[in-house]
Image (tube, grey):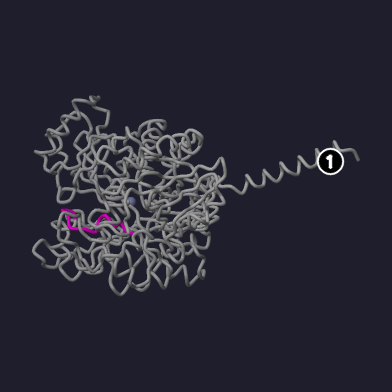
């Protein structure tokens, strides 16, 4: 053998060695920070490295130093806090995005006189024919009551629909009633409420499933418009550090939007869809087969767009005047005297229990909207029957909202492995939790409104969801309210004993949420082998005054190793950012922009 081949062989061995060396280097190293890992020990580390979409090391700066090669992007965190990517387990991105394009009534006092100029202003900018629906959204519906004739004084020619901000109520004018074809002869809708006068004539107010009926009758915008509106909203969610979410109400219309976003590469987060069960009393094999087929169709990608969950309404809402939430004991009247009204369950409990047994056996996660203590109990009973019939199938069933839970039911969450999905942002004193609620429940029950602390103490797994656009999707507001039970500014807290520790609130949006979404093997904590879903924050949540948590700015959001948000100058959001954070960004702007382009 001559020298030539030997040299060639040597050269190839050398280059293979260099390649292996190169491979051992990380793509990105974040160092000199405070990495809250949410690992089982809840360890806090200094540095983290990832390659592609996978975390390869978490440890000290010294630990990750050998992973830095010539091509590695190194970010000096200058002490900033890093959390796992945040997970919103109950949100309505598409419905919310569409509502955002409607005439906005947020913050407008809900009386006909004050609504009139606002709505007429919108109408002037959005003219249409007598057959073209006009919709307004975010009506502060608590305590609001009006008839179609009242709405006619605002607009009589065009059909008008005013959507309440609880997402369960809608008011229409007379032209709207005519277009809907709803008359005294129209039968009631199970699980819904069509308000009627003494003669049975609909008065223009619809709640719960009757409001879904109205929604389905109003033509929706073209698919591409829905996709564009949702994509813009998802970008804003990335700016709040959200890297995964569960859409808690998915019909074929929402499914089409998610699919299009996925197909066109416009999903900056992991999405799980919960398929809406229109009739939770239908426990037939056919109904189960349809849900399974819809779930299978919604499982587009094992990580980015998945289904596997269904959404059921057990009851409605608790606030006066709707009072469609199901209570164990009747509502009181405005003066605290008992009434005969206790709300109603939106399913037959025995049939629903059989449906849950079947869905559980088929491997689906059941996510129940339950507001009143009777709805919560009936849901727990159904999960208990599934447990008895099937054993523990590890489907991580969930009850969302939990406005009122009977203390006797607190321990059952842990016993049955049922996850408590709280909207932590709701647990404060505000118009919705006082006037239309407090007198109608009385002090004994009011003390347990949104019992996050009690359920936490009883060992329940707590997760968080915003239910946007019912309330803001800013997770830091949820953290602050969950910890303080107050809206800030020295406001009196709501049931202070029901506060939860900050770590529990963070868990609710990270590792526990990932568990609920059945994606905790890949996300929810920052550990080697998991996906690089993480956020860099401008302040240290763990040490600051809890009353300032909601002012947190997300400096960077990574999804699957990609930078999907960076707080760069030129974003409107930066204008009120503190100087430190601005400086922090300035130093690294160029580098981050480079990644963004590369990715
Ligand atoms: Zn919801």
Q: Is the magenta stretch mostly helix, strand or loop?
A: loop
Q: Nearer the viewer, residue 436 or 194?
A: 436
- In the current view of this chain or complex, which residue is farthest to the front? 3
Q: Name the residue under label 1.
A: 6
Q: Where is residue 230 in the image (x, y as percent from the top left)?
A: 38, 37
Q: Is disc 1 surrounded by few (<14), some (14 to 19) or many (20+) residues within 10 Å?
A: few
Q: Is residue 426 magenta?
A: yes
Say above or below: 213 vs 547: above
**Front-most of residues 551 and 389:** 551
The answer to which quarter of the image holds residue 329 is bottom left
Image location of residue 346, percent across then percent down: 32, 58
Can residue 306 be seen at all in this image of the molecule? yes
Farthest residue, direction right: 1
Q: Which of 522 and 310 is in front in this view?
A: 522
293 left or right of 145 in image? right
- Which residue: 73% across, 43% down? 14
Task: Quadrant for the N terminus, please.
Answer: top right
Which stretch appears magenta?
Answer: 422-432
**x, y (%) of residue 342?**
22, 64
């Amino acid at each position: 053998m001559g020298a030539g081949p030997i040299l060639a062989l040597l050269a190839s061995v050398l280059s293979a060695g260099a390649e292996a060396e190169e491979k051992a280097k990380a793509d990105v190293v974040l160092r000199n920070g405070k990495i809250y890992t949410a690992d089982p020990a809840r360890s806090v580390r200094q540095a983290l490295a990832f390659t592609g979409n996978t975390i390869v090391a978490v440890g000290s700066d010294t630990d990750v130093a050998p992973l830095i090669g010539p091509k590695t992007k190194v970010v000096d965190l200058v002490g900033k806090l890093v959390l796992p990517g945040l997970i919103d387990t109950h949100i309505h991105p598409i419905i919310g995005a569409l509502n955002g394009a409607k005439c906005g009534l947020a913050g407008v006092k809900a009386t006909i006189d004050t609504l009139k100029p606002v709505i007429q202003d919108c109408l002037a900018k959005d003219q249409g024919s007598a057959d073209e629906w006009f919709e307004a959204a975010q009506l502060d519906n608590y305590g609001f009551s009006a008839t179609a004739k009242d709405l006619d004084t605002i607009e009589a020619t065009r059909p008008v629909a005013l959507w309440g901000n609880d997402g369960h109520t809608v008011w229409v004018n007379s032209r709207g009633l005519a277009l809907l074809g709803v008359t005294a002869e129209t039968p009631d809708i199970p699980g819904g409420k069509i308000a009627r006068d003494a003669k049975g004539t609909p008065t223009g107010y619809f709640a719960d499933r009757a409001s879904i009926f109205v929604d389905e009758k109003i033509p929706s915008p073209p698919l591409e418009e829905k996709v564009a509106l949702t994509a813009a909203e998802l970008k804003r969610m990335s700016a709040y550090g959200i890297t995964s979410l569960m859409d808690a109400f998915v019909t074929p219309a929402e499914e089409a939007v998610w699919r299009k976003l996925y197909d066109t590469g416009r999903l900056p987060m992991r999405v799980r869809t919960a398929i809406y069960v229109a009739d939770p009393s239908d426990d037939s094999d056919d109904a189960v087969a349809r849900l399974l087929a819809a779930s299978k169709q919604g499982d587009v990608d094992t990580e980015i767009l998945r289904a596997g969950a269904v959404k059921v309404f057990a009851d409605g809402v608790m606030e006066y005047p709707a009072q469609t939430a199901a209570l164990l004991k009747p509502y009181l009247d405005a003066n605290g005297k008992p009434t005969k009204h206790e709300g109603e369950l939106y399913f037959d409990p025995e049939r629903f229990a059989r449906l849950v047994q079947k869905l559980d056996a088929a491997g689906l996660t059941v996510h129940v909207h339950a507001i009143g203590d009777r709805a919560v109990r009936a849901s727990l009973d159904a999960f208990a029957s599934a447990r008895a019939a099937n054993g523990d199938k590890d489907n991580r069933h969930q009850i969302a909202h939990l406005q009122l839970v009977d203390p006797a039911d607190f321990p059952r969450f842990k016993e049955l492995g049922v996850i408590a999905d709280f909207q932590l942002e709701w647990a404060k004193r505000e118009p919705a939790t006082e006037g239309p609620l407090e007198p109608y429940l009385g002090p004994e029950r009011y003390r347990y409104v949104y019992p996050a602390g009690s359920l936490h103490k009883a060992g329940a797994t707590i997760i968080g969801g915003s239910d946007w656009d019912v309330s803001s999707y800013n997770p830091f507001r949820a953290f602050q309210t969950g910890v303080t039970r107050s809206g800030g500014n020295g406001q009196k807290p709501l049931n202070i004993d029901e506060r939860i520790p900050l770590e529990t609130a963070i868990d609710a949006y990270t590792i526990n949420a990932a568990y609920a979404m059945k994606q905790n093997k890949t996300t929810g904590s920052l550990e080697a082998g998991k996906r690089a879903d993480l956020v860099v924050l401008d302040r240290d949540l763990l040490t600051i005054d809890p009353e300032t948590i909601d002012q947190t700015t997300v400096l960077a959001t990574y999804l699957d190793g990609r930078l999907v948000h960076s707080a760069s100058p030129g974003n409107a959001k930066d204008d009120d950012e503190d100087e430190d954070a601005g400086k922090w960004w300035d130093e690294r702007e160029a580098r981050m922009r480079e990644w963004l382009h590369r990715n």
